[in-house]
Amino acid sequence: MVSVSALLASNDDAPALVAAIALRRDRDAFARLFELYAPRIKGQLMARGAGAALADELTQEVMLTVWRKADQFDGARGLVTTWLFTITRNCFITHVRRQRWPEPEPEPPTAPTAPDEQLAAARDARELRQAMGELPHEQREILVGAYDRGRSLSELAEEKGLPLGTVKTRVRLAMARLRERLTGKVEP
Amino acid sequence: MTPVHHVSEEELVEFAAGASSEPAAVAVACHAALCAACGARLRTLDAIGGASLAAATAEPTAPGALDGLLARLDDDGGPRAAPVDPAALRLLDAHAIPRLVLPYLAPGAAASGWRRLVPGITRIDLRAGPTGAVVRLVNLRPGLEIPLHDHGGVEYTVIFAGALTDDQGRFARGDISIRAVGERHVQHVTAGEPCVALVVNEGPLEPLTWKGKALSILAGR
């Protein structure tokens, strides 16, 4: 089991681990990344409704995708956890919901990521996590319901016995607050 | 042209969380592919997913999972790329339709081309669940009027070429129109250029005029 402090420390190492996989097919880096994140990936898959055995199988799929696509990770666009989230989400949709995931087209290739951009992305993510922690409970639980459990807003409204409009308002308020904290840098 | 009609914050959140229906997701993705602002918003929303993953409950993986996976890396030939239908690519590129639509075209659908739905409208059906939703590319004749109708389910329209107008304004390339059940509208195709669009109907259209009802029967609905 990875301790919280090790996990926090690892956030800064994670891009280097992914780069080592991309550049050198570094199996030790891959094993380290697995130890750091596979349990969280499995946890999120189970929160979305996969049983333990299926979640294990899908976690392997996610990590195999990491191995194959390590060269597509771009530190300027976000943290490793963000990248892992998108792979996990897409894997769940493909294998459990039996749907295809429509990836909005990637933008034209940009120049290699400058280290300061990576730092900026990491700082934003840390601020984002902190800001999420500070959201009022009723706003946070909607975001958690959507992102952790993959529930639609109408499903969440039904669960909580709330009008859909109220749930939508909470999402808007939450996003306005988060955006405020993110200093408009990630938002044009 | 920068799109002026966007996806709401709530619907972007649903999409990023992976909670949209497949037809809705296709429409949102098509808009985001053509709208830099919504594309950037989605990246922020993915970061919320990253934060949620970092905070997810850690479930111990099955014993030997890592060793089994490391063994698989050796003979991993990478994902098998699906063969791409050149006719499908030509069709999408001819109308500057985002290529994310590609996997939703049935085999051979692009080769058979635009097929008549009703006078003034040709279409190519797309495959996206759940059943009951109609997802298609439509090609609308310049100047066409789509008579007053209501919607039995949410309607998503993303414009790729030409323009449509209704009571909410003018919708041109990249714009998305999202109309809920009970929102009635008449749509006009701007003169001079055919309008090519993605249309998703999560429920049946409910025509409210005799002309519309006749067209609906012609369309086999």
Image: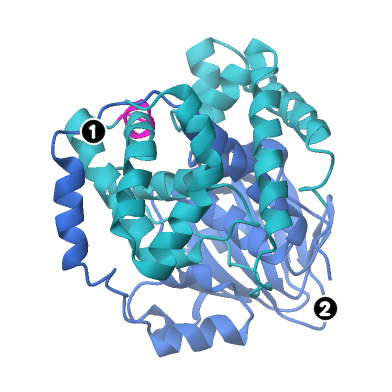
Chain colours: A cyan, B blue
Q: Which mark is residue B61?
A: 1
Local packing at callout 1 (Cα closer than 10 Å; few below 14, some 14-19, many 20+) is many
Q: Chain of mark 1?
A: B
Q: Are marks 2 and 1 on the same chain?
A: yes
Q: Chain of mark 2?
A: B
Instruction: Identify which residue is drawn at 49% across, 38% down.
Output: A10
Q: Considering only vertical position in the picture, is B173 above or below A156?
A: below
Q: Nearest to the eye among marks 2 and 1: give it.
A: 1
Please identify the quadrant where the N terminus of chain A is shown: top left
Q: Which mark is residue B191?
A: 2
Residue A113 image point, x, y percent: 66, 64
Read off the magenta span: A44-49
Q: Which mark is residue B163?
A: none
**Frontmost residue, B158 versus A10:** A10
Q: Is residue B213 visible?
A: no
How many numbered callouts? Answer: 2
B28 lies left or right of B79: right
Q: Main secondary structure of the magenta part?
A: helix
Q: Name the N-terminal-most of marks 2 and 1.
A: 1
| Amino acid type, label 1 | Thr
Instruction: Identify which residue is drawn at 47% across, 43% down.
Output: A85
Q: CA distance from mark 2 to mark 1?
A: 60 Å
Q: Is residue B16 magenta?
A: no
A10 lies left or right of B27: left
Write down the quadrant of residue B137 in the picture.
Answer: bottom right
Q: Is residue A46 magenta?
A: yes
| Disc 2 secondary structure class | loop
**Frontmost residue, A82 versus A25:** A25
